[in-house]
Amino acid sequence: MDRNVVVTGASRGIGAAIARELARRGDNLVLAARGRDGLEDVASASSSTRVHIVTADVTQRAEVERIRDEAIRVFGHADVWINNAGRGIVRSVLALSDEDVDEMIAVNVKSALYGMQIIAPHFMERGRGHIINISSFLGRVPVATPRSAYSAAKAALNSLTANLRVDLQRTHPGINVSVVMPGLVATEFARHARGSTGSVPPGAIGSPLKPQTAEEVAVIVADLIDHPAAEVYTNSASHAVAARYFADVGLFESEVPSRS
Ligand SMILES: NC(=O)c1ccc[n+]([C@@H]2O[C@H](COP(=O)([O-])OP(=O)(O)OC[C@H]3O[C@@H](n4cnc5c(N)ncnc54)[C@H](OP(=O)(O)O)[C@@H]3O)[C@@H](O)[C@H]2O)c1
């Protein structure tokens, strides 16, 4: 496709799978994360296209600016910016510390806010571009209570994404802003969650959504670039679960066994 696509959190999991899928489709890539080894592995598996890696911590605004600057320096411009980096938590509401909440907001909300604020002026200048924020179904329907502050952060991300989309639709209709809400995806996400003991949190057991692979999610994200939409659930079962939730929250909560 020969587009220039920036992917954060591309050293493993969903971000790495998106990178491999986009490389297969012929896009040029800027891949960012903190771990250089993972980025290099992904880049070497994507050797059919031009790939530039940037080690960066996306909770730091200046580092997200550096990702953009590197993308423009290497490829001249960016067409798509995917805010994918994120982290979970295993902590119920009553156990949350200030540090827990601060980290969930920093890595799941501020990181993407920086990405949106930093790339939007470039897209506005060009009159086109696509911002994709990888959120979570938990940001729409909080079905896993141990992920509490993560769900809350992803809900905030959904809201920021929608607000930016509405603003840009009015002034810059050539710019798309999308949010992607995967359900459970088989990655190392649970193991890397703050407070994780390595096991799956109890709230995820018996979830109404069956796990997907990172590759399945990556195909959906790649198709979203070709056919922009405001919101995407990657799991086809999510629509029905969300509809049931909003129809009667109390009833839903009393019926879903995963809400431990
Ligand atoms: N897996 C799921 O079940 C699931 C479900 C719904 C939504 N999601 C969302 O999908 C996205 C990807 O998750 P995943 O499952 O692929 O998780 P993962 O395997 O843990 O990968 C997370 C990625 O984010 C990067 N990252 C984390 N903190 C970062 C930071 N401060 N700066 C830069 N990069 C950072 C990690 O790289 P480094 O550690 O090298 O920095 C890694 O590449 C996240 O936004 C997650 O919330 C996942």
Image: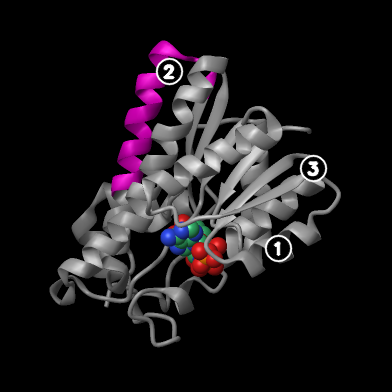
Residue drawn 54% across the image and 58% down it = 33
Percent position (x, y) of residue 96? 18, 72
211 sits to left or right of 64: right
Q: Which residue is mark 2?
A: 169
Residue 139 can be seen in this image: no
Residue 239 can be seen in this image: yes
Sequence-wise first label, 3 or 1 = 3
Is 2 included in the stretch rendered in magenta? no
Residue drawn 39% across the image and 87% down it = 197
Question: Which span of residues is magenta-colored?
Answer: 156-175
Q: Are circles 2 and 3 on residues that touch, CB within 8 Å? A: no
114 sits to left or right of 73: left
- Under mark 3, the amino acid is Arg
Sequence-wise first label, 2 or 3 = 3
Q: Which residue is mark 3?
A: 25
Q: Determine whether 179 is above or below 260 in the image.
A: above
Choose between 259 and 72: the one closer to the eye: 72
Q: Which residue is mark 1?
A: 40
234 sits to left or right of 109: right
Sequence-wise first label, 1 or 2 = 1
Q: CA distance from mark 3 to mark 1?
A: 19 Å
